[in-house]
Amino acid sequence: MRITRDAYARAGHFAADHPYMGVLEDVEHRAAHAEVWVAESAGKVVAAVTLTFAGQPYIGAISITSATFMERAHALYGSLGFRRAPERDWHVPGEDVLLWVFTLELGG
């Protein structure tokens, strides 16, 4: 929870009291529906990612949500086969901030 919250707050995306921070901090929900992995350095958690596998929810595609201004990230996603899914774009709750969604459909 700390890693995700601090990453968004330090980057200036949301204030600590923003309503969406509650969604980002809900690691228990993600862990109940997927796998949550962490990376440690010197015994301290320094990174986290949520993954799903065959047979778990959310496995039909990989989805990435990205701020509209992150052009370099968008280019990376495209080079890896991700495609824009504008029908899944969404606004940050309570804000006029549009987030784009990129997906990579998983085969077979």
Image: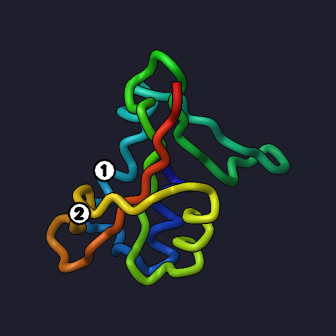
Residue located 45% across and 55% down the image: 64
Residue 100 visible at all: yes
The residue positioned farthest toward the top in the image shown: 55
Q: Is residue 103 above or below residue 70?
A: above
**In the depicted view, which residue is nearer to us: 83 or 30?**
83
Residue 101 lies left or right of residue 96; in this view the side is right
Q: Position of residue 49 (x, y in %)?
A: 58, 45
Q: Position of residue 66 (x, y in %)?
A: 43, 67
The residue positioned farthest toward the front in the image shown: 108
- Name the residue that disc number 2 marks: 90
Residue 28 visible at all: no
Q: How is the image coloured?
A: rainbow
**In the depicted view, which residue is nearer to us: 106 or 70?**
106
Residue type at mark 2? Trp
Residue 5 lies left or right of residue 38; in this view the side is left
Residue 12 lies left or right of residue 22; in this view the side is right
- Name the residue that disc number 1 marks: 23
Answer with mark 1 or mark 2, whichever residue precedes in sequence. Answer: 1
Residue type at mark 1? Val
Residue located 76% across and 45% down the image: 40
Q: Secondary structure at mark 1?
A: helix
Q: Which mark is drawn over residue 92? A: none
Label 2 neighbour load within 10 Å: few <14, some 14-19, many 20+:
few
Residue located 42% across and 58% down the image: 102
Q: Quadrant of residue 18?
A: bottom left
Q: CA distance from mark 1 to mark 2?
A: 14 Å
Label 1 neighbour load within 10 Å: few <14, some 14-19, many 20+:
few
Residue located 40% across and 74% down the image: 67
Q: Is residue 20 above or below residue 48?
A: below
Q: Is residue 38 above or below residue 72?
A: above
